[in-house]
Image (cartoon, helix red, strand yellow):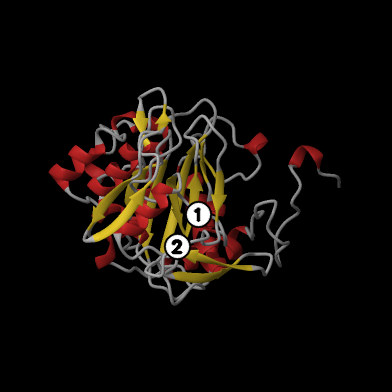
Amino acid sequence: MGQAVELDVDGRAVRLSNPDKVYFPERGFTKRDVAEYYLAVGPGILRALRDRPTTLQRHPDGVTGEFFYQKRAPRGLPEWIPTERITFPSGRHADEICPTEVAAVIWAANLGTLSFHPWPVRRGDAEHPDELRIDLDPQPGTDYRDACRAARRLEELLDGLGLRGWPKTSGGRGLHVFVPIEPRWTFTQVRRAAIAVARALERADPGRITSAWWKEERGERIFVDYNQTARDRTIAAAYSVRPHPRAQVSAPLRWDELEDARPEDFDLATMPARFRDLGDVHGDMEDHAFALDGLLELADRDEREHALGDLPYPPDHPKMPGEPKRVQPSRARD
């Protein structure tokens, strides 16, 4: 596996054990390759994670081995990596790491972390999201091209409301669009705004886009996964290495390159060159913070004019007031 090495990360020494351990057998990428990738895109991944409680997706034996999600800060956490206490839907809580420097990313990579899953909140205010995250999830029979068409519908919707989104690949077939928002609303309110987005997109293109929670109702359409905005639901950060045999990464995109991009274009080998040439194409996200009033008014109108209330929460979430029955339609009884 090779002797441990010490990496200099902006003046902080970070130990990397077993640097030659192969993490991606199909490509031959090692643990050190993952660490050096995160060094190469350091300002980008730090921008996506800075001060955010972050869950670590750890693959200590690479993508062909077992993996797990670590929510609580790992043992041996250095004193220079801060934490934030977050509360789960169950009422239990945990202290999660909040990276404030690239060295924290490399420290986590040494533990076998491939993907970083940050909460949409910042340290110091864990109850008010500052991002609306829209997950465009291709269902069987659809692909990235279909997600792009849905993303264009979303761009039009956001523009009409005076909002702006920043798109990225999921690292697989889907797309994520993040909208920076003022941290004034609760998780429940932000989720309600996401439901309004999903329903508006579905109305605009019902043959290709769906808000249906139950898989049996989705068909060959793009599912707008509104529940990714529920408390304790996270989305892989921009630049995260994904557990894909080809070591694909979640790639931030400009809107003008959406259709020409391919998820497979962005991986452990290609993203550093892109980052060197273009920098962080989402770097200006932090200069913006939009209001959700327009989307919440859209939700009010859905309820007032179309009698459209809440939608089901994830199965492990406590039953919420006003939530419909959490039973798939084919098993429902009158």
Of the pair 134 and 45, the residue shown nearer to us: 45
Looking at the picture, how far across and down is residue 290, in whole percent? 34, 68
Residue furthest left in the image: 277
Looking at the picture, how far across and down is residue 148, in whole percent? 36, 37
Residue furthest right in the image: 334
Q: Residue under circle 2?
A: 120
- Left or right: residue 263 versus residue 334 is left
Residue 77 is at least partly visible in this image: yes
Asked if marks 1 and 2 touch (Cβ < 8 Å), the reply is: yes
- Left or right: residue 197 versus residue 165 is right
Residue 159 is at least partly visible in this image: no
For badge 2, the amino acid type reads Pro
When asked about the image quadrant of residue 147, the answer is top left
Residue furthest top in the image: 26
- Which one is earlier in the sequence, the residue at label 1 or at label 2? 2
Of the pair 161 and 231, the residue shown nearer to us: 231
Disc 1, SS: loop
Q: Residue under circle 1?
A: 234
The residue under the point 31% across, 35% down is: 268
